[in-house]
Image (cartoon, grey):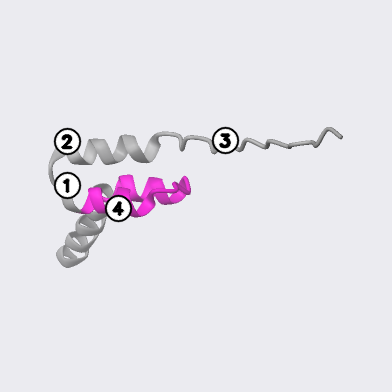
Amino acid sequence: MITLFILIAILFGAALYFLPTILAYLRKKSNLVAIFAMNLLLGWLFVGWVIALVWALSNDSPTTIIVHSHKDEG
């Protein structure tokens, strides 16, 4: 019974630690790999975890497409 409790606690802790990565995946972020790397390498620092969380929850900047058509006059 205690082993099951420890296993559940470890899984819950891992899910909480990787919450920024999970949210980035669910939000289909274009920079998921970078968020994962920051979460993995700097997540143990509270500041690194918060930065990864904010990054995961931020909106991706929209892609702007400018179409320029050139018409010959003549």
How far, Cα to Cα, is label 2 from label 3? 32 Å
Which amino acid is tagged 3? Thr
Going from the N terminus, do you reach mark 1 or mark 4 first? 4
Rendered residue at 20%/60% (across/down): 5
Going from the N terminus, do you reach mark 1 or mark 2 first? 1
Instruction: Give the residue at mark 2.
Output: 47
Which amino acid is tagged 4? Phe
How far, Cα to Cα, is label 1 from label 2? 8 Å
Which corner quadrant holds the C terminus? top right
Rendered residue at 63%/35% (across/down): 66
Q: Are marks 1 and 2 in contact (CB under 8 Å)?
A: yes
Q: Residues within 10 Å of mark 3 (few under 14, many from 20)?
A: few
Going from the N terminus, do you reach mark 3 or mark 1 first? 1
- Which residues are drawn in magenta? 18-40
Provide residue 32's location: percent of width, then percent of height: 38, 51
Which amino acid is tagged 1? Leu
Query: Mark on residue 64?
Result: 3
Rendered residue at 57%/35% (across/down): 64
How far, Cα to Cα, is label 2 from label 4? 15 Å
Going from the N terminus, do you reach mark 2 or mark 4 first? 4
Provide residue 37's location: percent of width, then percent of height: 25, 53
- 32 lies left or right of 13: right
Instruction: Give the residue at mark 1.
Output: 42
